Amino acid sequence: MIELVKAKLSDIPAMQALVAPEVKDGIILNRTEDEVATNIRSYVLAKDGEKLVGYTALHIHSRRLAEIRSLIVDEAYRGQNVGQRMVQFTLEEAKNIGVEEDVLVLTYLPQFFLKLNFKEIDKEVIPEHKIWADCIKCIHFPICNEVALVYKLA
């Protein structure tokens, strides 16, 4: 049975190993071990027993805006609603901590998020600090094919 749990610092090596192929292909932004450690409280993991099979993070930009980042599911576990469960967990977490309006996601898989009631938006409305803090680190910058979507909390 797959459980969703909050990440611990001891999970970082397994997290880095799971995401490595997606980082290499430029699908997920590289985060150093130190960056992951600094933000460890934002991560939720999907575990099958002791095996890490997926994770994501909820990053808070402001009182009004949060972002789902680094969503990854082990290929062997895709199609089993692991990603959907993690997204739903982060949306609940956003509500519980008081995010007032939107949860943003940038993705190459918009259909997945559209099925979860996210709506596509123009990338021009994404907060500027997001672009300079994260997007500039991407191997695809400035030519970005990701799709921006938001989930309305309010």
Image (cartoon, helix red, strand yellow):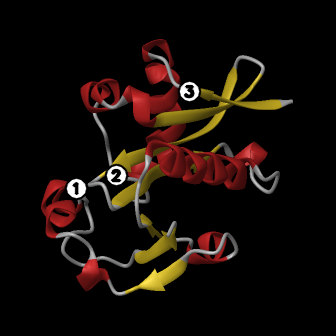
Image height of 71 relative to 152, above or below: above
Residue 43 location (% of width, % of height): 48, 35
Marks 2 and 1, how far apart at CA: 8 Å
Image height of 48 relative to 21, above or below: above
Task: Determine whether label 2 and label 1 are within 8 Å by CB.
Answer: yes
Q: Is residue 134 left or right of residue 42?
A: left
Circle 1 sits on which residue?
134
Instruction: Mark 3: give few (<14), some (14-19) or many (20+) Cα within 10 Å.
Output: some
Q: Amino acid at mark 2?
A: Leu
Residue 36 location (% of width, % of height): 34, 30
Circle 2 sits on which residue?
29
Q: Which quadrant of the structure image shows residue 115?
A: bottom right
Disc number placed over residue 6 in the picture, else none:
3
Q: Amino acid at mark 1?
A: Asp
Task: Determine whether label 3 and label 1 are within 8 Å by CB.
Answer: no
Residue at horizontal 41 percent and vertical 54 percent from the top: 99
Q: Earlier in the sequence, mark 2 or mark 1?
A: 2
Residue 25 is at least partly visible in this image: no
Task: Determine whether label 3 and label 2 are within 8 Å by CB.
Answer: no
Name the mark nearer the viewer: 2 or 1: 1
Instruction: Mark 1: give few (<14), some (14-19) or many (20+) Cα within 10 Å.
Output: few
State the residue in front, 110 or 66. 66
Per the image, label 2 sits on a secondary structure element best described as loop
